[in-house]
Image (tube, helix red, strand yellow):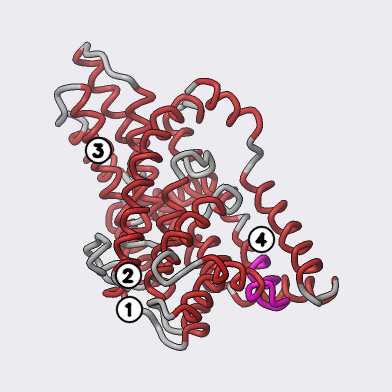
């Protein structure tokens, strides 16, 4: 895995550059593949930005508040106690993965931070016992828990689809209840919300678990310093969606998908395309905003339940997160490692989870 690790570290640019390049690429595609001119493209970008301001704020708070909550004293004290549970290296790796996955199902920002902090605490506990354990593999286990985040409490796609007034409701004509996505028979979760309730709950917990307002402000400032690069990308994603909608590029791309898809294969193709797009749009919320309109149109034309593609996009996003270094950055910063230190381990997770997700989409497609 070392050549792959080295290549990733040397040649993959920052996620912000990805977003900028994708913006330019989409603008060029709109100019070349539709009748729109430069003015229409620019106007579409502006319309997209203003139309998704509420959505961008909601997703920003999910990450900010999740990070702050994971850094409160009671939560970190609990992690110290949890670190003493596994008694062997193998159990330690599995334990860190399971806890990080459970935290990711609650909210993705929470899961990322919990994974990094718990890996560090477990490594320290093993050092005190004078037991050998691979710290990079512990960190990789913590990040691997992120592979299920879209299937739970803060999944961007299903929560947006279930929120009245969302862009998905406007396109489909109705909201898509959580029972058809997160609570569908082919997905796993335990909590029913909307995005606003998630944020209010975590804000309340932060106040309850902090000793005073000064501690709250410190937690928020620390969280903001770790998530600023991520938040900067949301306006670019909104602009991309605006261009695609205003110029008709969504329809062009939808036509290309319908041309090769069938009702049985649309879910699988949506999953694979989302995994590819995730390399260029490393944000679940941004990716849903960009791809959902295209795939929902394709689903309508092929008479496929929209809940299938609403979950296919998140599946693809969380799948290739395992080798997309962007979301690993907060966790790696906590652990003091680089992406090449864990990429060999997370590539294995990519292969295994890819089989599971693809098989799920095929099974769902067979039932259409």
- Residue shown at 42% from the left, 69% from the top: 310
> Residue 34 location, x and y as percent?
77, 74
For the residues bearing labels 2 and 3, Cβ distance under 8 angstroms? no
Q: Can residue 48 be seen in this view?
A: yes
For the residues bearing labels 1 and 3, Cβ distance under 8 angstroms? no
For the residues bearing labels 2 and 4, Cβ distance under 8 angstroms? no
C-alpha separation, residue under disc 1 versus residue under disc 3: 34 Å
Q: Earlier in the sequence, mark 2 or mark 4?
A: 2
For the residues bearing labels 4 and 1, Cβ distance under 8 angstroms? no
Q: Circle 3 sits on which residue? A: 79
Residue furthest to the bottom: 173
Q: Circle 2 sits on which residue? A: 181
Which image quadrant is residue 250 in? bottom right
Q: Circle 4 sits on which residue? A: 236
Helix, strand or loop at label 4? It is helix
Asked if residue 354 lies left or right of residue 294, the reply is left
Q: Which of marks 4 and 1 is nearer the N terminus?
A: 1
Mark 1 surroundings within 10 Å by alpha-carbon count, few (fewer than 14), some (14 through 19), many (20 or more) = some
- Residue shown at 47% from the left, 46% from the top: 320
Which region is colored magenta?
A: 239-251
Q: Earlier in the sequence, mark 1 or mark 3?
A: 3
Q: Circle 1 sits on which residue? A: 177
- Residue shown at 52% from the left, 56% from the top: 273
Q: Does the magenta run of residues contain 277?
A: no
Asked if residue 149 lies left or right of residue 258, the reply is left
Q: In this view, does 1 lie above or below 194?
A: above
């Amino acid at each position: 895995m070392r050549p792959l690790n080295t290549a990733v570290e040397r040649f993959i640019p920052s996620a912000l550059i990805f977003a900028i390049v994708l913006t330019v690429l989409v603008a060029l595609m709109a100019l070349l593949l539709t009748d729109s001119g430069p003015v229409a493209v620019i106007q579409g970008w502006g319309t997209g930005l203003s139309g998704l301001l509420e959505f961008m704020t909601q997703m920003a708070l999910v990450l900010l508040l999740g990070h702050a909550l994971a850094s409160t004293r009671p939560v970190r004290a609990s992690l110290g106690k949890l670190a003493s549970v596994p008694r062997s290296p193998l159990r330690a790796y599995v334990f860190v993965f399971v806890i990080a996955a459970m935290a990711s199902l609650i909210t993705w920002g929470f899961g990322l931070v919990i994974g990094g902090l718990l890996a560090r605490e477990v490594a320290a506990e093993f050092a005190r016992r004078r037991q050998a354990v691979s710290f990079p593999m512990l960190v990789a286990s913590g990040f691997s828990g992120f592979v299920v985040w879209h299937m739970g409490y803060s999944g961007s796609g299903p929560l947006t689809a279930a929120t009245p007034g969302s862009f998905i409701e406007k396109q489909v004509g109705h909201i898509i209840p959580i029972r058809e996505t997160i609570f569908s028979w082919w997905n796993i979760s335990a909590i029913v919300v909307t995005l606003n309730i998630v944020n209010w709950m975590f804000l309340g917990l932060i106040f309850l678990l902090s000793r005073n307002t000064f501690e709250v402000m410190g937690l928020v400032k620390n969280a903001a310093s770790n998530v600023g690069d991520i938040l900067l990308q949301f306006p670019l994603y909104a602009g991309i969606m605006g261009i695609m909608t205003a110029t008709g590029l969504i329809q062009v791309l939808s036509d290309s998908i319908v041309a090769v898809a069938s009702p049985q294969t649309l879910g699988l193709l949506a999953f694979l395309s989302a995994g590819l797009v995730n390399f260029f749009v490393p944000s679940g919320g941004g990716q849903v905003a960009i791809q959902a309109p295209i795939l929902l149109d394709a689903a309508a034309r092929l008479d496929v339940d929209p809940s299938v593609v609403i979950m296919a996009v998140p599946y693809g996003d969380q799948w290739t997160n395992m080798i997309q270094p962007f979301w690993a950055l907060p966790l790696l910063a906590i652990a003091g490692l680089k992406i090449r230190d864990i990429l060999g381990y997370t590539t294995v997770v990519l292969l295994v989870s890819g089989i599971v997700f693809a098989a799920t989409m095929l099974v769902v497609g067979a039932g259409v």
